[in-house]
Amino acid sequence: MRTQRLTVAQALVRFLAAQYTERDGRKERLIAGVWAIFGHGNVAGLGQALEEYGDEVGLPTYRPQNEQAMVHAAIAYAKHKNRLSTFACTASVGPGSTNMLTAAATATVNRLPVLLLPSDYFANRLPDPVLQQLEHPTEHDVSVNDAFRPLSRFFTRITRPSQLLSALPEAMRVLTDPAETGAVTIALPEDVQTEAYDWPEAFFAQRVWRVRRPVPEPEALAEAVALLKQARRPLIVSGGGTLYAEASEALAALAETLGLPVCETQGGKGALPWNHPWCVGPIGANGGTAANRLAREADVVLAVGTRLADFTTASKTAFQHPGVRFIGLNVAPFDAAKANGVMLVADARRGLEALLEALKRHQGSPAAYRAEVARLKREWDETVTAYRTPKPGKNPMAQAEVIGLVNEVYGGKATVICAAGSLPGDLLKLWRPEDPKGYHLEYGFSCMGYEIAAGVGVALAEPGREVVVFVGDGSYLMMNSEIVTAVAEGLSFTVVLVDNRAFGSIRGLQMSLGSPSFNNELRRRNPKTGRTDGPPVQVDFAKHAEAMGALVWQPQNYAELEKALKEARRAQGVRVVVVPVSVDDRVPSFEGWWDVPVAEISNQPAVKQARREYEAHLAKQRRYF
């Protein structure tokens, strides 16, 4: 066998550059590049290999400002690319690697592929302890990287070069499997990275990983068809799997042919344009009246590509029909089985196409139900328009109206990005996408700090696409440094920084549960009370963003905001629009509920009242479907 002598790091670079995915005849690189922050653990290993071989094999290296943020950028890239391509991320021993833990969880929770290459202690254990090594009194072989084990879909530590020969193909298999994908972690001891080995040349041959599109089993399909034929009030819940499978056309065809209303999760919003006649808007805790009222009385629910999280099911209060049955159309059996559903384990597009073929002679939902759906959709659209439309003279501005104005200026084909705070709920209700890639929310982990890094990832995934990043001031303060990365890379996107004076979302939740505002506003410590209820801390976000290289606008009213947005849209580079909004002018819940327990015992009357209301909602919670 012909061999090539390379270090472990050099072999890794050569191998990753030769990996491709293919689906529906479209082929693209599995690993688009490497995000890297170098330290003593990887600068002479992977750093040397990327410098010497990266350009030669077409594997570019990107330099971020924060290890967590670089993984978030990779996650956003993979999400926008429908999980067909992602990045590798390398960090040094110790804090560099552990900084990636939060983002590893974000990837795995959201079923999104990312390859993590944390450096590790010396495999030879001669420098022991090495700088930044965690010493354990009884487990001599443990390292901080073992914390990645529960957060990863695949984990291994390479202690000998030959282990790479079996580990890397297995890692690629997990990355490209639509049911198993998530964070894949390969821990690389810093001495092993530099060790030489005679690698079989076949190891570096191009490999195309065909991303599977399984079809449903005939027996499961027949059971699902029988349920849909007898349904009088059927409902489709569309999740992120619909988008990853590029199943929008199949979803629309099934809905139109059979008269099935389609409601959206955070992950699935945009699968149908907002003005599609069968798109009834969001469901659940942050849902709208149309979807929530239809869900309440639905007798058969077709859950497509969704994991039925608590926000989607309104903490299991959304579906009140005593005999409601679920059909779980999902590529992952783990998710297909939820809510005691008929397990239709299949690719979303092929599953929807199979259902349509089997039901093409069925008359579909009753005429009265179709009329009800149309009425509820019309009423919901009118409600959304009312909340989105700016009211002149309002000061400070309302977050809902800011969302509406941004949507009007940028249109429904721009990608809007968000992750945490009150913005995701308001965007789910109020943003009107017209494109399957028009809505990009990380809400599986709802990770503060994801937003701007995600803007970098989406801008890299589709150069030329208009991108709008919504971020609250609290999340901005957590992680804003990737503005510098975007500037360095010459990327263009708009950041709408909504300033409601720190953690306004959780403050609102806190107060809705009976507690007074406590430790969520950005205020100085008060020497009289000992609490953070002193004067507000004034942060000049505009100067801060400008110092990092962004173009900045500071509108104070709706007319100035519209002008600023139009100017920002015409500009190039990172554009930051700082928008002060009311902390109390909030979008209400539309018959949705989220289970956040209230103190059972309290001396505060408002908490006692909130507990009574909480117990009333608990009475509606379904213990079993």
Image (tube, rainbow, N blue to C red):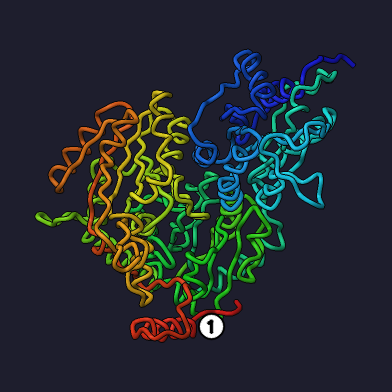
Q: Which quarter of the figure is the N terminus placed in?
A: top right
Which quadrant of the figure has residue 227?
bottom right
Is 252 left or right of 209, judged from the image as shown?
A: left
Callout 1 crowding tier (Cα within 10 Å): few <14, some 14–19, many ≥20: few
Q: Which residue is drawn at 26% across and 36% down?
A: 543
Name the residue type under label 1: Pro
The quarter of the displayed image where residue 30 is located: top right
The image quarter containing residue 399 is bottom left
Residue 621 locus on image (x, y percent): 51, 79
From the viewer's side, name the closer residue of 392 and 276.
392
Q: Residue at x 30, y 62 (%)?
A: 526
Element at label 1: loop
Q: Is residue 97 left or right of residue 502?
A: right
Farthest right residue? 1
Identify the residue at horizontal 28%, vertical 32% (top origin): 546
Check the image and report above or below for 430 versus 579.
below
Q: Mark 1 points at which residue?
A: 322
* Residue 180 x %, y %: 68, 48
**Residue 28 seen in the figure:** no
Q: Is residue 570 above or below residue 419?
A: above
Location of residue 465 with respect to 237 vertically, above or below: above
Quadrant of the frame with the C terminus = bottom right
Residue 568 screen position, x and y as percent: 24, 33
Give the farthest residue toward the left: 393
Q: Which residue is more in the foreground, 23 or 587? A: 587
* Most foreground residue, 591 or 275: 591
Instruction: Measuring from the top left, give residue 296's x and y in whole percent.
Output: 44, 76
